[in-house]
Image (cartoon, rainbow, N blue to C red):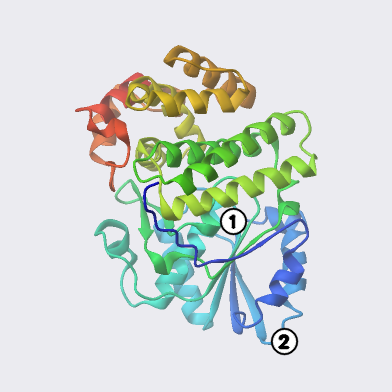
Amino acid sequence: MDQFKLYVPTRIYFGTKITASAITAEAELLKGDVLLITCGDVLSLLGHTEALLSYISTVRTVERVVQFMQISENPKLHEVEECIEFGKREGVACVIGFGGGSAMDAAKAVAVGLGTNESLVEFLFNDKQPKTALPVILIPTTAGTGSELSQGAIITCAMRKKKSGIRGVKVYANAAIVDPIFTVSVPKMVTMDTGFDVIAHAIESYISKKSSAFSEMLSMNALRTASEALGKLVFDLNNIRAREAMSYASMIMGINLGNVGTALPHRMQYPIGALTDTSHAAGLAALYLAWIEYGYDCNQEKWNCIGTVINGVECSGKTDVLNEFSKLFGKLELCYSLSELGITSKDIDGLVEAITGDICADPAARFEGIIRAIYKKSL
């Protein structure tokens, strides 16, 4: 068995209705003025924000909680910078990200911005890693991104029309509170979108050349769990056991994100998201069939295993795998193409040029022109 390294510095609290006790357990971290970051007022309308504030109010070391809600679905650099300035004025000592991946990524980026005097541009576009950050607690309200356990904060710079990440060990949250109760109110389309992100994390970390025996075990666990749970949620969004399963799968894929990372589709989605402001999962789904078409021969055994797991139908070739993914997309109502997202052939050069980060972990990256070929086939 090959050697591997596993690093999970974040304290993890998992379970339905665990938030109150978890907040109490993190009293040492919650001191002074606390900054709560969310996306809009949806969580307030559902009563979730008020519930969280009531739990925080029991922590005697907290003096007050200030809120920042102006974070959009794909968090923008100017929003994060505005939140940093707000946090500085308020003198906050701790950051809580409460919401989907956007709120959590923004919270991690804000914590970095408040903990350093450097511009976030240095970390986003110059491959620099932050050395300091304020303490962060992340509480996901969707099951998908795994951001609560990853070492990245994905941010879009509207001026540059680029989507990139702040990465490094200081980006990890101090604590993650994964309470599936918050996901029950998530509507069907968002449930399926974010659910496919879990599946994508499982597949890409399994395919990656950085994978290990341990990460592959987590990948297969998450892939099997998420595929079964999403199949149940298609028919019953109130199925709490399925919601718990999705939150669990998303969480353990956060561990893989921090230790293994993803593959070509994630790197290729970032330019799509920056250009079209469409959802992360929509961009991934649009790319997946073409990625499989070109990447299958790089690791046939793994792809056959993946195709078999997602629907429980034995796969023994590329056509079988592609058929099972087509069925999966139909079931989840994720039948996207790049043209449906507003991409044309004229945009492909710009998309290729906007790719950032290391793509070499993907076995298919060895093929010359693979990125352009996948974009073209995905139109």
Element at label 2: loop
Pair 1/2: label in front: 2
In the picture provided, is 23 more to the left or to the right than 311? Answer: right
Could you tell me the amino acid type at mark 2?
Arg
Label 2 Cα neighbours within 10 Å, binned few <14 / some 14-19 / many ≥20: few
- Say above or below: 113 vs 63: above
Q: Residue furthest top?
A: 319
Label 1 Cα neighbours within 10 Å, binned few <14 / some 14-19 / many ≥20: many
Percent x, y for residue 313? 60, 18
Tag on residue 60? 2
Percent x, y for residue 25? 69, 76
Q: Nearer the viewer, residue 216 or 124?
A: 216
Could you tell me the amino acid type at mark 1?
Cys
Q: Nearer the viewer, residue 217 or 93?
A: 217
Residue located at (45% from left, 62% from top): 7
Tag on residue 39? 1
- Say above or below: 58 vs 113: below
Q: Residue furthest left?
A: 368
Residue located at (55% from left, 38% from top): 220
Residue located at (51% from left, 83% from top): 91
In the picture provided, is 70 more to the left or to the right than 367? Answer: right
Element at label 1: loop
Marked residue nearer the N-terminal end (1 or 2) = 1
- Say above or below: 88 vs 283: below
In the picture provided, is 377 more to the left or to the right than 189? Answer: left
Q: Nearer the viewer, residue 189 or 9?
A: 9
